Image: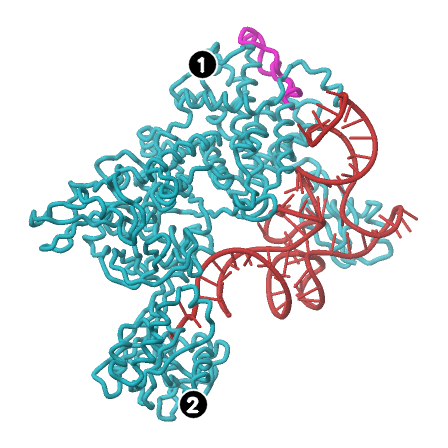
Chain colours: A cyan, B red
Amino acid sequence: MQKQVKSERKLKIDRYDPQAIESKWRKVWKENNLYKFDKDKVENEIESKKKEKFYTLVELPYPSGDLHIGHWFSFVAPDILSRFKKMNGFDVFFPMGFDAFGLPAENAAIKRGIHPQDWTIKNIETMTNQFQTMGTMIDWSRVTITCLPEYYKWNQWIFLKMYEKGLAFRSKMLSNWCPVDQTVLANEHVENGRCWRCGSEVVQKEVEQWFLKITDYAEKLLWKDDNKLDWPNSVKTAQNEWIGKKEGVKIKHKVVDMDLEFESFSAYPSWSWADSYIVIAPEHPIVEKLVKGTSEEKEVMAFVKEMSEQTELERKETTEKRGVFTGRFAKDPFGRPDMPIWLANFALINFGTGIIRCSGHDERDIEFANKYHIPTREVVEKRKSGTPATPHDGKGGILHDSGPFTGREVNEVREEVIDWIEKKGIGKRFINYHLHDWSISRQRYWGTPVPMIHCKKCGIVPVPEDQLPVTLPYEVDFTPKGKAPLASNEEWLSVTCPKCHGKATRDPETLDTFFDSSWYYYRYLDPKNEKEAFSKKDVDDLMPVNIYFGGGEHTVGHTLYARFFTKFFHDLGLVPFHEFAIKRIQHGVVLGPDGNRMSKSKGNVINPDDVVKEFGTDATRLYLSFMMPYNSTGPWDTSAMYGVYRFLKRVWELQERVKGEGFSPKNREEKDAKELYPFSLTLNPNDLYEMHSTIKKVTEDIEKISNNTAVAALMKWLNYLEAKEIVSIEEYKNLILLLAPFAPYMTEELCQSVILNRLGSSSLSDLGIEDLRAHSLEGLFQDLNRIPDQVGNDNFISIHQQLWPEFDTKYLVKDEVEIVVQVNGKLRGNITVKSEQLKVNSKVEEIAKKDEKVSKWLEGKEIKKVIYVPGKILNFVV
RNA sequence: GGGUCGGUGGCGGAAUUGGUAUACGCGUAUGGUUUAGGACCAUAUCCCGCAAGGGUUGGGGGUUCAAGUCCCUUCCGACCCACCA
């Protein structure tokens, strides 16, 4: 039968040739500014409520030089959603930029002798070209590049605002230091004791540097239960854990026979009566004072030295508890015997006060006490998994004796105990956060210069706003020497103090690139704005971001910082909202064909250029959509590429079976629509059901970012269409419209060639807009009327400007429905029921009982109960 | 140790949210087609069984007319965080 159809064909079609099609349309789209985002027009439409905006944001990539298949994977789904939204009548804002400052540029430059700036700009060019083959609807005329003064000027401006509000401050602190990259690292960028960039072991070093007081926003950054934002649960809980809010007390201690006091932190004050000894982190500054001149001094300081020489990693890998006795004791403010003071490797300088009260409750404390024979106190109950000890009053009496505690009671007791401690003046309520102030300055070259001036007379003086930007000089010796490279450029460094006009120097440090990426989505609104970082009007019109796509690795780093900046902007009155993105979607990873992460050394890297060369962009996009859910991680499978390629080819070849062709503008007037489209009127209920249910499925799935199932639905429908002898124009039109967001090039070609064929014209430029418009009235495409409004060139009409097909629920009901019949819950047969009888239980039952397969199972049995789910299932219980 | 998400054919993965488990694709098999080919087309493809039928969503138990889906229990895996007092 199929051969017959083929031999009958009237339309001669060319072979599907993705390369030719794709390069052609890329050029046409560009010439016609198809993806130009006309902000003024959009703002107009939004303000006059003509259209709604939709802001799609994808984490801006680092210009490493190569567009990886991972970039494709992460950008294809956002592009599909954006195209879909556009076809649904939204004004879609889908901008793009490059996170262009940062260490790799500098390291590559050192290695190859190219200047970081040249290296970066070259990479941006290469990647932009590669990105353009992807066929996204990104408007490339609005690209934001963070290493340009027009961008980082506003970094500096924001920094000055933060300084003004006391959020940026300078301090000397023990910090994570990467000995290879020669710079400090934020806590968020130490992974298992290693530098997130180069993987070398991080050491602790005392460095004077700039911090942002993100801890001031700790409370506001916590995700509360009533937060309605559509962010993954995993992100919310991970951020809350990272912020690590713990309520407890700081308890004051006096050292016996010394004029010295210190504080310890406890999150479980109810256990204080069982605390038996004190442990101090080796780095704690009090240690030296404690042991000075004592017989223990030598041994203690040797321990301190040994610990300080350990890398973070070595320390984390040691599970063995080690410590040394200081020879000192502390008074127990709870009135129990004096507590010996020890140093121990498990006490962390960064947590609480760096000083722990240890008890006989905690397994780790007991382990340490047993090792060094430190006596622990008697308690009424020992801590077992999750059960707190009953608190003592210290004199043998029991403070609370309410039996085994439930979670609620523990919290009640905690509050009472804290009140009691505060009343006695033993300590103070204290909330400890795991989140630390963000170390923001880097001792490297390729970043935003800190807009500060150091004057011997006036101290630290901010660069006046009107002198921004402080430009990054090109001529610098940027080989790492443990010192900020900018200091090597004397001419740049020396400056007159804005206050006293005396001699002063610039701050030679640069900002962490995570500063740049904390607010770029505001700059996207108007990257060339010379007057301000972003305008209130643009924010009102286009923000917040509707959906933010990105990787899971930014859960506690970047996305937290970005939320922090937004809250800061809110406090400055610059933005009206508290959160910048309504929805967050995280993508997975495309692994190499061998199931491992792609890496050059393993030789399992899939190069998008090669794939495109073989299968074309559309097939690559389609495969990336189809291979797995967006948030999954799984291997690339080249043989599966053939599957989607075949699918596209079959869609292409289906043209042959589309009926309704063969008229030209001349004969258009002579015939009416019915004659022109005889087959579009012959869609039977089944055809309509298949078509409308596919439209419904694809529409809902794209909205859910479930593109793998959307593609599956299209494939299924194609299977159905291929089994028909004749495919109507309406079906074909909807098929390519639904496919358009996934395969933008091929569907454009089909749309154009269908129009051309139907109009009997050989090229688009021969046609006037009147021809196209008149044609649209005859039902080929739904709304060509709105098109001249959208693009400058009236002669070009793109499929990507068409309205998305709508489904009609009336076609989702078949006139005959199959109902599953079960006996005792087991499938025994299928019956076909006319839809008007569906609601009549007795009728459906009657039909089922007559069914041969079913009646066999009912014979001689007594029917106890009948369950009928209309239109779905009928179950006899016997 | 904590958190999050999972466990369904040979593989990637579906399942209208409690209603025909294995959609869609890959792979495989057989046949066809092409000068040859990675290609293309047709048919088949969860397991047992000639069939009638029976079994199957990591294991065990439960709720229900009905469980991949809900509850209990147990095992396994992935990712992130972690000597956090």
Chain for mark 2?
A
- Horizontally, residue A325 falls left or right of residue A163, namely right
Q: Please state which amino acid type lies under the numbered disc 1.
A: Ile
Residue furthest toward the bottom? Answer: A396
Residue A812 visible (yes or no): no
Where is A778 relative to A596, above or below? above
Which one is nearer the viewer's eye here, B23 or A238? A238
Please tell me which of labels 1 and 2 falls first in the chain.
2
Residue A84 placement (x, y as % from top left): 48, 34
The secondary structure type at the circle numbered 1 is helix
Judge whether residue A679 is colored magenta.
Answer: yes
Which one is nearer the viewer's eye here, A140 or A821? A140
The mark found on residue A378 in the picture is 2
Which one is nearer the viewer's eye here, B74 or A364? A364
Chain for mark 1?
A
Q: Please state which amino acid type lies under the numbered disc 2.
A: Glu
The secondary structure type at the circle numbered 2 is loop
Quarter holding the N terminus of chain A is top right
Question: Do the residues under discs 1 and 2 have CB atoms within 8 angstroms?
Answer: no
Residue A626 placement (x, y as % from top left): 58, 39
- Cα–Cα span, label 1 and label 2: 92 Å
Residue A379 visible (yes or no): yes
Residue A808 placement (x, y as % from top left): 57, 34
Judge whether residue A610 is colored magenta.
Answer: no
User: Label 1 belongs to which residue?
Assistant: A769
